[in-house]
Image: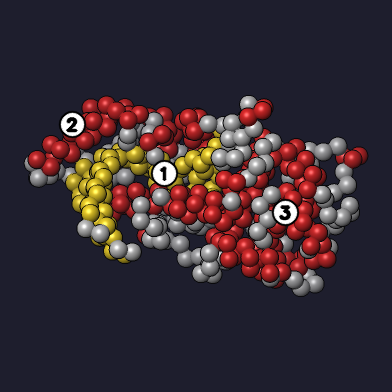
Amino acid sequence: MSENDAETVTDQSLVGHFAVLEDPRDGTKRRHLLIDMVVIAIAGMLCGADGWVQIAQFGREKKAWLDQFLELPGGIPSHDTFGRVFSLLKPQAFEHCFRAWVASIRTVIPGEIIAIDGKTLRRSHDRSKGLAPLHLVSAWASANRIVLGQVATEAKSNEITAIPALLELLALKGCIVTIDAMGCQTKIAEQIVAQGGDYVLALKGNQGTLATEVEEAFIDADARDFANMDSDFFETVERGHGRVETRRYRTLADLSGVPRSALWKAMNMIGMVESIREVDGKCSAETRFFIGSIGTDAQTFARAVRSHWGIENELHWGLDVAFCEDDSRVRETAARENLAVLRHIAMTQLKQDPAKLGIKTKRLKAGWSESYLAELLFQPPKRQDAKATSDGANISNR
């Protein structure tokens, strides 16, 4: 870090967006500045720390470096102090700063896929207090490769109420929102359209009648070879690692065989995906059905369906593997939510670095290189050339 690093903080820097946080503590009993603690926590998370003990140890090991730009009137806080302060800090306020930072680095891409999905932090429960594991519903911008926001619940079944709350926080104009079957609800579709977005929603048993109508509509159309119908078809074949994956995407605009389509705002298509996997001469097949407001272009439909898995493969899987999220034993309600936001901050910032390194390796690099860590903390991220057509390009087979 250069001697002028403290002057490099800009409005778009990661640290700069958290300077507005209101300190929840009694002003007469503060030994440590809130912004100092937030910076240490973010820096520690970037460098491989996964909990309050490791964050505090990181601070002690890097105190000489931190002294160059933090005031640290009480030195480095203990791990108990980190835990206590982040349990007092309102998750909504911390999340608000996170979203403001994300908005400043996000490139607006017409037609970008925004995937909504939930994840349970398995070891965050406390049975003695009747506290269920934390369940986070997150929004992932696939081309930008950033987390746009998250809402916490205490059960997967609460996703139906959490998704509308999350959508309210997002700018959806011109984007395509994808949600799995749990979020296939008429009010959610209506909200997406009202906010200027389009949707592609998966169908399963929770919309049994609609799912049956859609399936029968495709059976009838196929029997007529889709003749004189507004329909489109797209196929991909991928080979690698000893397997062959064939995916056939079919769209259909004729909703006359889907009476319940009238209940869905702006619904103008149904979609079908046939996935055929061949491994060592053995074949397996799966057919999935969707509804949407995106029209019948099959490549757009394919991009939406494939890109949805980015939230699983790039975000959720990365949080478990690179950040050991499922192993976190932080149980205090606000603290575990704030720690989850810290992980999303680190994951998002490291994803913005165009270096072709894994997240684990980037965390190690941040711990080894103070100049790299300073760049992550204090400089606006290097913008990548994200394009709508790149959605799903790097998503592994699913």
Viewed as shown, does residue 271 lie left or right of 16?
Answer: left
Instruction: Tell me if residue 320 comes above or below residue 186 in the rendering.
Output: below
Viewed as shown, does residue 394 lie left or right of 138?
Answer: left
Residue type at mark 1: give it: Val
Residue 63, by quadrant, is: bottom right
- Decide: few, some or many residues near mark 2? Use Cα within 10 Å; few <14, some 14-19, many ≥20: some
According to the picture, the residue beneath numbered tag 3 turns out to be 54
Q: Residue 257, which numbered label?
A: 2
- Residues 313 and 258: in front is 313
- Decide: few, some or many residues near mark 3? Use Cα within 10 Å; few <14, some 14-19, many ≥20: some
Viewed as shown, does residue 294 lie left or right of 378?
Answer: left
Q: Secondary structure at mark 1?
A: strand
Residue 9, by quadrant, is: bottom right
> Which numbered disc, 3 or 1, marks the residue that appears first in the sequence?
3
Residue at (27% x, 32% y) in the render: 211
- Discs 3, 2 touching: Cβ within 8 Å: no
Instruction: Tell me if residue 48 comes above or below residue 220 in the rendering.
Output: below
Residue 324 at x, y percent in the picture: 59, 51
Residue type at mark 2: give it: Gly
Residue type at mark 3: give it: Gln
Residue 274 at x, y percent in the picture: 24, 47
Residue 90 at x, y percent in the picture: 70, 37
- Residues 280 and 180: in front is 280
Q: CA distance from mark 3 to mark 1?
A: 37 Å
In this view, which residue lies farthest toward the bottom? Answer: 2
Instruction: Tell me if residue 69 comes above or below residue 181 in the rendering.
Output: below
According to the picture, the residue beneath numbered tag 1 turns out to be 177
Residue at (53% x, 64% y) in the render: 358
Q: Secondary structure at mark 2?
A: loop
Q: Quadrant of the N terminus?
A: bottom right
